[in-house]
C-alpha cells in the first residue's frame, strides 16, 4: 500500500506499471473514484489489472476523506480535489498528459481538472458523471443535505441492514460519519462551478459512459451536445453502478480508446496539444460518435 | 516451489495471517479462519481491505500471484460470495503453474 503526502494530505495510491517492454513510454490512466462509500478499490479490483496487462500504466488513488487517505475536517470543494490530483501527479513524477477515468464524482473532478490543466489531460473517460455546472451544484447540494439528514436517523441504517445486510449498513455508517464530521456537505456543491463557455473550452476527447437507467437517463446526450469532442456510450439495462456491474464492458471500451490514441508515442503529445488547441486530429475525430 | 510450500494448509495459514494483519483493528485474534470463511459475511472485509491483501500477497509470492487479476475476472455477486478457500485455491494453482513453467 503506497502513501504519499500530496497537497498536505497523506494520500493512499496504487500503481501498476504497463506490462510491456518500455513502460516509461506507455500511456497512463488515472482512476478517480466516486463519493461516499467508494474508494480506489472499485477500480483496482475491476479495471486495473486488465489495463496494465494491455500495456497501459495504471494509477488509482483514494480521494481525500475516502478509503485509506486522510480525512481532514475541511477542504472539500471540487477545487481541492483538483489540487490534490495535480499534487499527486507531481509527487509521483508523472510526466505528459494522462487519461483520466472518473466514476460518478470522480468524473466531475476529471472535468474540473481538465479545465484547470488542459495540457496535462490526454482524454477523459467519464462514467455516470457530469461536470461541476451550476445545475450539478444545486442537485448535489440537495442530495447531500438530504443524505446527511437521513443518516442522523437510526432507522436509516436499520433499513439498509434489512435490505442489503450488515456490511452495507457498516459502510453507510462510515459515510455518515464523513458527512457529519467534515465540511463536505457544505463545500462540495460550491465547486468552483463552471460556466457553459468554460465547459465548452474543454477540448480533450471525452467518452461519456452512461447507464440507460442511470442518473442522466433523462437527457443522456446533453454532455455530448455541449462538448466539442465527446462520444456518448449508453449501456442498456444498467443504472448508476455501471462500473461495478458492467466492468468487463467498460474495459472493452476503455482499453481500445486509450491505445487508439497511442499508435505512435510522439503522436500522443501532438494529439494532446492539438486537442487542447481545439484542432483534434483525424484519428481522434474517428472516435467521435 | 516445493509441494509443501504450495500446499493448501501452508497457503491457508499464510493467508489467515495476512487477513489478521489487514483486519487488525477489528480484533480477529480468536476467530478461526477456514477455507469456508466468507470474506464478505464472516470477515466483513471491505473492498479496500482486499486491495491491502493484494499487496501482502504480491509481497509474499511475487507478481505471479496477482489478486487484482483474479478479481477482475469476477462478477460482483461472485466477489460477494468469495470464500477464503477460493483464494487459497487460486494461490496454490498459480504457484504450481509458475513452478511448472
Image (spheres, rainbow, N blue to C red):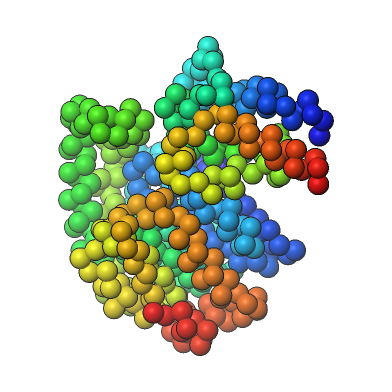
Using the image, determine if residue A27 lies above or below residue B101.
below
Using the image, determine if residue A107 lies above or below residue B37.
below
Using the image, determine if residue A5 lies above or below residue A252.
above
The residue furthest top is B30
Q: Indicate the quadrant containing the N terminus of chain A: top left, top right, bottom left or bottom right.
A: top right
Q: Residue A61, how many percent across, how many down?
A: 50, 49
**Residue A196 visible in the shown view:** yes
What is the total number of numbered labels drawn onto the structure image? 0
Q: Residue B38, how many percent across, how many down?
A: 48, 27
Name the quadrant containing residue A148. Answer: top left
Q: At 27% across and 69% down in the image, what residue appears?
A: A220
Using the image, determine if residue A272 lies above or below residue A151.
below
**Residue B59 visible in the shown view:** no
Q: At 58% across and 82% down in the image, what residue appears?
A: A270
Q: Indicate the quadrant containing the C terminus of chain A: top left, top right, bottom left or bottom right.
A: bottom left
Q: Is residue A32 left or right of residue A88?
A: left
Along the line of sight, the residue nearer the viewer: A49 or A80: A49
Q: Residue A176, how many percent across, how many down?
A: 28, 35
Q: At 60% across and 42% down in the image, what residue appears?
A: B67
Q: Residue B15, how many percent across, how many down?
A: 62, 27
Name the quadrant containing residue B68. Answer: top right
Along the line of sight, the residue nearer the viewer: B51 or A242: A242
Along the line of sight, the residue nearer the viewer: A124 or A213: A213
Q: At 53% across and 11% down in the image, what residue appears?
A: B30
Amino acid at each position: 500500500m503506497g502513501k504519499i503526502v500530496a497537497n498536505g494530505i497523506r494520500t493512499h495510491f496504487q500503481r501498476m506499471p504497463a506490462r510491456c517492454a518500455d513502460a516509461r513510454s506507455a500511456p497512463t490512466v488515472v482512476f478517480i473514484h466516486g463519493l461516499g462509500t467508494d474508494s480506489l478499490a472499485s477500480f483496482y479490483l475491476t479495471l486495473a489489472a486488465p489495463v496494465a496487462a494491455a500495456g497501459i500504466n495504471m494509477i488509482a488513488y483514494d480521494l481525500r476523506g475516502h478509503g485509506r487517505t486522510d480525512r481532514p475536517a475541511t477542504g472539500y470543494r471540487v477545487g481541492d480535489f483538483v489540487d490534490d490530483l495535480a499534487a499527486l501527479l507531481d509527487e509521483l513524477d508523472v510526466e505528459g498528459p494522462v487519461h483520466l477515468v472518473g466514476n460518478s464524482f470522480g468524473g466531475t473532478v476529471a472535468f474540473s481538472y481538465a479545465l484547470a490543466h488542459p495540457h496535462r489531460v490526454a482524454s477523459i473517460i467519464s462514467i455516470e458523471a457530469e461536470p461541476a455546472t451550476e445545475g450539478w451544484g444545486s442537485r448535489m447540494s440537495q442530495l447531500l443535505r438530504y443524505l446527511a439528514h437521513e443518516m442522523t436517523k437510526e432507522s436509516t441504517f436499520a433499513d439498509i441492514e434489512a435490505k442489503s445486510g450488515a456490511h452495507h449498513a457498516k459502510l453507510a455508517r462510515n459515510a455518515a460519519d464523513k458527512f457529519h464530521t467534515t465540511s463536505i456537505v457544505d463545500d462540495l456543491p460550491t465547486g468552483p462551478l463552471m460556466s457553459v463557455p468554460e465547459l465548452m473550452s474543454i477540448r480533450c476527447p471525452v467518452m461519456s459512459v452512461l447507464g440507460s437507467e442511470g442518473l442522466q437517463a433523462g437527457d443522456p446526450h446533453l454532455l455530448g451536445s455541449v462538448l466539442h469532442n465527446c462520444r456518448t456510450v449508453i449501456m442498456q439495462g444498467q443504472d448508476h453502478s455501471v462500473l461495478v456491474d458492467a466492468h468487463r464492458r467498460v474495459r472493452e471500451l476503455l482499453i481500445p480508446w486509450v491505445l487508439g490514441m497511442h499508435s505512435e508515442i510522439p503522436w500522443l503529445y501532438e494529439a494532446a496539444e492539438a486537442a487542447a488547441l481545439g484542432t483534434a486530429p483525424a484519428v481522434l475525430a474517428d472516435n467521435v460518435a | 516451489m516445493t509441494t509443501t510450500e504450495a500446499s493448501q494448509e501452508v497457503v491457508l495459514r499464510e493467508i489467515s495471517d495476512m487477513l489478521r494483519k489487514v483486519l487488525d483493528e477489528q480484533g480477529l485474534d480468536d476467530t478461526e479462519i477456514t477455507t469456508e470463511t466468507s470474506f464478505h459475511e464472516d470477515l466483513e472485509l471491505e473492498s479496500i481491505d482486499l486491495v491491502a491483501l493484494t499487496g501482502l500477497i504480491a509481497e509474499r509470492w511475487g507478481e505471479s500471484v496477482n489478486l487484482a487479476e483474479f478479481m477482475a475476472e469476477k462478477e460482483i455477486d461472485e466477489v460477494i460470495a468469495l470464500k477464503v478457500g477460493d483464494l487459497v485455491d487460486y494461490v496454490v494453482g498459480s504457484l504450481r503453474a509458475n513452478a511448472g513453467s
